[in-house]
Amino acid sequence: MQITEIRESAVRLESKLRNAAFSFDEMTTSIVAVKTDVVRKGTPVVGYAFNSTGRYACGAQIRDRLAPRVIKAQSAGNLSIDPAEFDPQAILAAMMVGEKPGGDMERSVGIGTVEVAIWDAVAKISGLPAYQLIADRYRGGAVSPDVFCYVGGGWYLPGKGIPQLLDEVQRYLDWGYTLIKIKVGGVPLEEDIARIEAVLKVLGDPKRLALDANCGIGPDRRTAYAQAIKPYGLRWFEEPAHPVDYRGNADFIEAYGGAVATGENLFSVEDVVNLARYGGMRPGLDIIQCDTPQSYGIGTLARMLAALQPMGWSAKDVLPHGGNMMSLNFAAGFGLGMCEAYPDAFGVFSGYTDDLQLRDGILRVGDWTGFGFERQNDLFGLMQKVG
Amino acid sequence: MQITEIRESAVRLESKLRNAAFSFDEMTTSIVAVKTDVVRKGTPVVGYAFNSTGRYACGAQIRDRLAPRVIKAQSAGNLSIDPAEFDPQAILAAMMVGEKPGGDMERSVGIGTVEVAIWDAVAKISGLPAYQLIADRYRGGAVSPDVFCYVGGGWYLPGKGIPQLLDEVQRYLDWGYTLIKIKVGGVPLEEDIARIEAVLKVLGDPKRLALDANCGIGPDRRTAYAQAIKPYGLRWFEEPAHPVDYRGNADFIEAYGGAVATGENLFSVEDVVNLARYGGMRPGLDIIQCDTPQSYGIGTLARMLAALQPMGWSAKDVLPHGGNMMSLNFAAGFGLGMCEAYPDAFGVFSGYTDDLQLRDGILRVGDWTGFGFERQNDLFGLMQKVG
């Protein structure tokens, strides 16, 4: 069983969305195809992944350094896709040859995307869903099949006012979502408060609304946001400070009191440990978010969970970033707290299998093999063009 | 005055060196040329820079995102190379359009290299050395012309034993260096101790020897290294822990007591502030190292120094990483503590102008314009091929 080729292609997201920190106008993502010589159901197994959303395509790194290192390690007998020998740490070690410590993101996105695509291949070789392969390795086989799924929306768009925001919220409710997250910080505080109050009138329960500042609220506005939003008792407030401004995060938490979520812009075990150590985060109340294809992959998510555990954090306190089949499989396989969906954003790179039905805010995993990309017609069409 | 084109070319370092963490076998660097329509002494001004050493070439980012954004901002009137209007913050802001907060290194190397090359162009347009342009902007014109320069060496190489290490040290002494840094952590502790004792016999004063672990000593060996090396009273111990393992750094400092240096693998103001906050570092004793072309450029080094100042750190406590004309100009312009040289490593990418003489361990800056690359015959030949 051999990887025969690793291919990458960059695709534009074609999104005009904007949050408090930046717009997605130029954003691209890398689709990776890991081709193998293993045949299942008459065709060679190919593992796929893409680097989630919000970080640019990383094809140069994959072509120049990462893919050749995987092939070299395989030739040397240090890396195998045979399910009996498959070792995520060996895959990481192979791709980290010649890399200086620290400064992770330049390679963690490429490494994570290749690693996740290799998991897709190994799951297909095993005839298993990716969530089952994850659960078998890290949880003694225990899968959490019902994954609560919230919806991320409420983006800023040119000409979008409160009526359009409420239309959007109503659409999510009609589709069956029960917890909705909207952006904040991209307009003056009083405008955000008006948006929050309008949405709360529709949702009723404040625990059905979460906010996302995307690190776009500077220290000058942070306390005002904490104080103004605290009384509403919302589900969570996301990314109140720069991703590694741990003191800024802790100061916000002290002023705000309610639940805070952050972490999607951390890229290593060390970063996540620093957040838990210095960020004022409270296990059981606050939420740590991880973007696994962007942060070295599934083996590293397992190491993050293991590093967090002695500090009081359980898998339930961790959410995967990115509303796609990868994050759904991570959530079911590791028993993470919930997953997210972006039905109005990122085109084919958000969403689940075409036949997956949301019931009372819950997605139940199916009997796909690998991550189940084959059941996403439009996305899989793009993937097949890559390799 | 306009930038007409930004070009990049990747060059292999052709180095077989190894430290405790990794080898340089595959390492590349990006040479950047910022071409302008300004004519000085009969030829168009071109600004040059390269992304120091230890991080791979970043041409894809420069070509796909960073260079087009600079040209776009210039067309919109938001960025100028006219010395009267030149604003490093505007250059950074232009290149950060469309970038998510955090995860800096994927872009900070490209942004820093382009930014430093623009400084080279603006200094040449002004007819000034880069150190003078830096001092004029950030220190009211005060230049520190005499820069103490230590030498970094003592790498691990196949077949290199203590006799070869002592030959190397003697060569540095013959060239006029008075402070020498050698690698540690790449062999068992007792072998490193033998290397240290052998070098100390040649150097005499323990304050003439520094050590560099390159983050390659894991938590399991760290305390043993601290305890074994503490009694020698050496100049400093570099990178005892992973770059963002602030607690690991602080724990080492507590066990070791002597001066510690770290920071060359940090890439943002936030990272440097975290090191100062959480890393156990002691202003006036320990050393913070910055690699400016790798961490957003000269404007960001100025912001780092400004952020460190209220925490008790002065420019003298900060050293530039990378022994080249960029770091020498940074040291003289900002009044940094010293600079470093790698006469045996990194080929044309290390070293100073061909005519620069070291006297008693001190380099005196000359009357070059820009960074003075034109006086490095071999390097400048490579640069001219780029643009």
Image (cartoon, coloured by chain):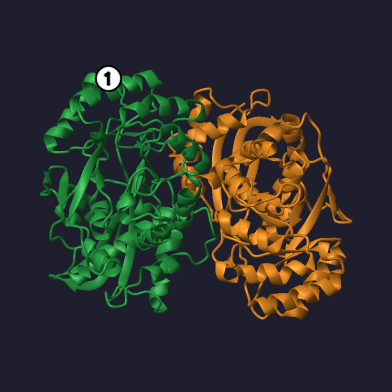
Chain colours: A green, B orange
Left/right placement of residue A156 relative to residue B280 reads: left
Whole-percent x and y of residue B387?
Answer: 60, 44
User: Badge 1 sits on which subunit?
Assistant: A
Residue at 25% x, 20% y: name it.
A162
- Compared to residue A54, the image places residue B346 above or below, namely below
- Compared to residue B18, the image places residue B66 above or below, namely above
Residue at 38% x, 37% y: name it.
A26
Number of dots carrying numbers: 1
Q: B222 or B197, which lies in front?
A: B222
Residue at 42% x, 78% y: name it.
A76
Residue at 39% x, 77% y: name it.
A75
Whole-percent x and y of residue A202?
Answer: 18, 25
- Compared to residue A3, the image places residue A202 above or below, namely above
Whole-percent x and y of residue B319?
Answer: 72, 49
Q: B96 or A167, which lies in front?
A: A167
Q: Residues within 10 Å of mark 1 (few under 14, many from 20)?
A: few
Residue on which the image places disc 1? A161
Where, quadrant-wise, is the N terminus of chain B in this rendering? top right
Q: Which amino acid is tagged 1?
A: Gly
Whole-percent x and y of residue A200?
Answer: 24, 26
